[in-house]
Amino acid sequence: MAKEDDFQSILENGISFGRGGREKTADDKVKTKAKKKKYITGAHGSGSAMQKAKYRQQRANRHR
């Protein structure tokens, strides 16, 4: 059984699941082309990207 001290510390501090307090650094970032302007606008020539850009534009103009 757990002691009363353990319960008190959990109530005060909470329970943390995950990275163990490690801070994110620039090296932890995922490098992707998906957010770059050229890919968002479909300017790089891919048919799929141009289609996605068209849908994004339609969604942006929906409530105007």
Image: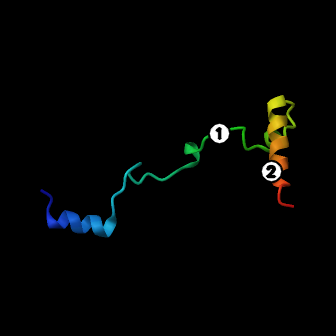
Residue at image coords 33%, 66%: 13
Q: Whole-percent x and y of residue 35? A: 73, 44
Three-letter amino acid code at the position of disc 1: Lys
Hey, which quadrant is residue 33 in on the image? top right
> What is the secondary structure assignment of the residue under circle 2?
helix
Tag 2 residue? 59
> What is the secondary structure assignment of the residue under circle 1?
loop
Q: Is residue 15 above or below residue 44?
A: below
Three-letter amino acid code at the position of disc 2: Arg
Q: Which residue is farthest left?
A: 1
Hey, which quadrant is residue 32 in on the image? top right
* Pointer 2 local density, CA inside 10 Å: few below 14, some 14–19, many at least 20: few
Q: Whole-percent x and y of residue 24? A: 52, 51
Residue at image coords 85%, 36%: 50
Tag 1 residue? 31
Q: In terms of sequence position, does the residue under pointer 1 or pointer 2 come before the other?
A: 1
Q: Whole-percent x and y of residue 49? A: 80, 35
**Quadrant of the snapshot with the N terminus:** bottom left
Q: Residue 52: in sight, yes or no? A: yes
Q: Is residue 32 above or below residue 15?
A: above
**Quadrant of the snapshot with the C terminus:** bottom right
Q: Residue 41: in sight, yes or no? A: no
